[in-house]
Amino acid sequence: MASNETSKEAAQSAADSAESTIERQVENAVLRSVFPAVRTRRELLKAVGAGAVLSSLSNLFPLGAAKALALEKAGPPEKKELTIGFVPITCGAPIILAGPMGFYAAEGLKVSLAKTAGWALIRDKLLNRELDASHMLSPMPLAISLGLGSRQDPTYVAAIENINGQAITLHAKHRDKRDPKLWKGMKFAVPFDYSMHNLLLRYYVAEHGLHPDQDIEIRIVPPPEMVANLRAGNIDGYLGPEPFNQRAVYEEVGFIHLLSKEIWDGHPCCAFGIRDAFIKQNPNTFAALFRAIARATAFAHKEENRKEIAKAIAPANYLNQPIPVLEQVLTGRYADGLGQIRNVPGRADFDPFPYQSMAVWILTQLKRWGYLKGDVDYRQVAEKVFLATEARRRMTDLGLTAPKQNYVRHTIMGKPFDPTSPDVYLSSFSIRRS
């Protein structure tokens, strides 16, 4: 027995030693790329101090994710039973359908999905370790990593869940107010401060000459409560996630004024969010999760699968929505509440690649509206939180097509965004929080 225990201890010690060696190799590679003039790691660390250098580097570079990639083994997940949070909206389809369609099980994972009403609760549950990973709004990991609205805790966008998939819905009584200039004094809802919904609504009304903090009122309303608040007259409209825009039409209380696709075609919406600490402790589990969700996202991207997905996510334990409502959202053939049947492919779509240029745009808007104060190194934060390089490697390994660039130019309401000049872009807006 003693011999057995000694063998186990020796094996564990060897494994720990191997992992330490790999971690040092990762640190060496990063140090050499950042400080090319320094010949050896020891030379630099002796001169400046290990703690100071590596602490500074962790602020510039996702060392935890890089080490997890290097430590990843072709072995079983360290943690097989997981709890993943989701809010019941179509944006979370890949995370949801990965369960009933067997993508998690294929990776050796047993996942319990925790249905949660709102985003503040999702954030708090993740920070309190009640969730291992979660469906999140794409700005949320940026906000959490920067300590905006919560305690600071390094959190990553491992993959984007969906693109597009939002809309501005107005109460049926406002059919004569299609011009946003007529919206002064109206009340709107968004699901969370740190959401694309909030940032896109603000952008849209500002482009029409309204100040979102002075000319309209913006309230935070959990997505499942949006239609009820519209019906009760508590709000005049919302920029919300699906299926609640289509649900308002289905219940004849509202109409779809504009798809978010018409503001920014291809904009990020929701993401697969995960804490740095979880990745470090469970690199194989993280890799297995990524594979499951990336495959589910690729499945969801195919238009021929959309009706099957609608049926899979409709039940009460998931979205609890009528299948016809979900089909209209996912297929892009829908009634707009104004008497028209529209056909808009890509109304909601699914693409896992987390472009870092998207993160830079989000940061410019958080700064524009006062959520982010002081100077910010846009590129540094974007590259730390949006794990584009890691996603490309993993997607390629899965045989999925991945973009070659982490940064691309985007166009929002006809205005180009160059991610290499964020301050110039930000200064171009006359309407902003003073």
Image (tube, rainbow, N blue to C red):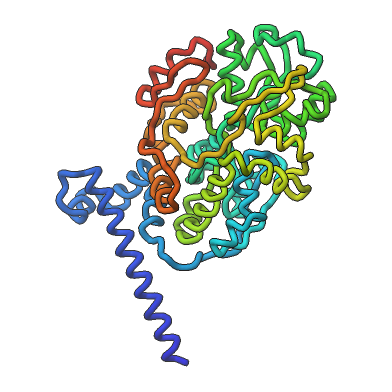
Residue 99's x, y, as percent?
A: 64, 55
Q: Eyeballing the image, is 25 above or below 266?
A: below
Question: Residue 427 appears in which quarter of the rendering?
Answer: top left
**Nearer-the-camera pick, 396 or 245:** 396
Residue 27's x, y, as percent?
A: 29, 53
Question: In the image, what residue occupies the spot 84% across and 24% down?
Answer: 232
**Nearer-the-camera pick, 262 or 354:** 262
Tell me, yes or no, if residue 376 can be seen here: yes
Left-right relation of 171 to 269? right
Question: In the image, what residue occupies the spot 33% across and 64% down?
Answer: 20
Tell me, yes or no, if residue 222 can be seen here: no
Left-right relation of 198 to 278? right
**Nearer-the-camera pick, 351 or 68:** 351
Residue 59's x, y, as percent?
A: 38, 42
Residue 385's x, y, as percent?
A: 45, 41
Left-right relation of 226 to 382? right
